[in-house]
Image: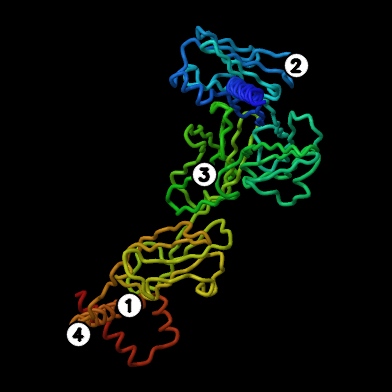
Amino acid sequence: MRPVSLVLFLTFALLAFSAGHILAGLAEGESREQKMWVREGSSAVLPCHLSPRKMRKSLKQLPDKTSVQWKRHGGSVHQESHGVLEVGYSGLQKTALLMKPRVSLQDSALHNGNFSLRIDPVRSEDAGLYEARVEYNSEVHSCHVELGVITVTLSPPNPVEENELLLMSCNSSYRGSLVEICWFHNGDLGPTSRTFCSLSGALSILRPAMSDAGSWRCQLRYSDNEIISATYDLQILGFDGPTNPVVYAAAGSAAHLPCSLSYLPSSFQMNMVTAHWSHLAGGHLQDWDIFPNLSNRSFPLHLPVVGPGDAGQYRCAVSVSHKTISREVTLAVVTVTPSIQGPVSEGSRLLLICSLTHSRGHEHFQWKHLGSVPTKSKLAVATPQNLEGSSAQMGPILKIPRVSQKDTGTWECSVYGPEGQLGGVEYELQITSAQVSSPPGIFSGQVTFGLTLTLFLLLAVCVVALALQKRAQTPAFSALEGMIGVPGPWKSMKENQKGKIQQTEC
């Protein structure tokens, strides 16, 4: 009995040792089938590596005579195979016409034991079972990878515009019975799980906004509890920055109106992008054509000098291929109007009125004397109560009751909003000294009075002399004397004058 038991023991031990070597050889020569899912349009790497034990036997580097052949079966290993990529001992590479140039080997030298197949980009028809056969040193190594493809479809296709109805659908090459499809945005379910988890799989976004851009994950659940998911990076063609931007600029300064795309589709070249600005001012439409900026997708409008007449809404329209998107940009101009034009005399009362065109209603203003410590006379925060009867739309008012030399210099009116300082305007105040005249002296006053009195007397004498001369030369006056009779004294006086005249004639 003992020899028989010993023989049986040795027999089973030899069988176990042989089976272990056979299984180990299969494990190294045959790799287990792997499954992987990728989204259509992305890249996939089908893994195939030699085990570390095999690499140690090859002195960490494979010989030059190594060949690799990748084949694809339609759905299983039993279906007819089609060549995908083959690299012979000589290094000659053969690629299937339908997959060229989308396929390549991770390690083209074939010396490091990495024979993984890279497909970029993946198409829906690439789904199937892939088999790799590696030959080196009269040994054979094989890999099997099942590739599944998930397709995410957009309607309308890229580029997706803001405020344009968007439908996102999701399906896969899996042959099971679909139970449910869920959509996740940035790792979370959508606003309502009722609409984001459904059997149809279509996700409807009525008015896409820039907040809807980002990572969306589509998760498909089948009746056999197979769960497949894919991630899609949704990009929305729009503009950077706020929806209705407002640019604040001081009158007399330059203004830059922004217009920058959120992204530029890689499938379009810059020569397919055009930008156009327009502005309706005084009943006339102004137009500007802007050349694209290759570095930052920006199409700003530069206005060298702006005034109140330039304020208003400007429209930036950008055409990308066959699609055109536009946005409105508002230019608000800040101005200062003084109550006294030009230089201001010292001691005068001065009002500086800071006004803003196209106000949004939440701005407030602050006056500051630059380069000096604010005091009650130099700093005033204008509110509607300061306007003293003026209408609120005239803007804030800085009051200086009596202008002095310390008020000379630059005054700044700053415009603030909830987000901080929005803009401002500066006003240069020039002050002239008051002219002081000396009081008149006593002597100069007397001279002036004497001259005036002398001129008055001379004028009176001339008037009387002219009147008497005209009266004496009038004939009607003598005739009137004879008719009415002249009194004795007056008549004798006339005769005496007449006798004197005759004596003078003799």
Image-based side of 257 in relation to 349, left or right: right
The amino acid beneath tag 3 is Pro
The amino acid beneath tag 2 is Gln
Q: Kindly identify which numbered label has been placed on residue 442.
A: 4
The amino acid beneath tag 1 is Val
Query: Local crowd at mark 4 within 10 Å, few (<14), some, or many (≥20)?
Result: few
At a point 27% along the width and 72% down the height, the residue shown is: 435
**Residue bearing mark 2:** 79
**Mark before the other along the chain sequence, 2 or 4:** 2
Image-based side of 343 in relation to 360, left or right: left
Helix, strand or loop status at disc 1: helix
Query: Local crowd at mark 3 within 10 Å, few (<14), some, or many (≥20)?
Result: some
Q: CA distance from mark 1 to mark 3?
A: 85 Å
**Residue bearing mark 1:** 463
Helix, strand or loop status at disc 2: loop
The picture places residue 85, in percent across and down from the top left corner, at: 60, 14
**Residue bearing mark 3:** 258
Q: CA distance from mark 1 to mark 4?
A: 32 Å
Q: Is residue 366 above or below residue 301?
A: below
Query: Local crowd at mark 2 within 10 Å, few (<14), some, or many (≥20)?
Result: few
The picture places residue 57, in percent across and down from the top left corner, at: 47, 20
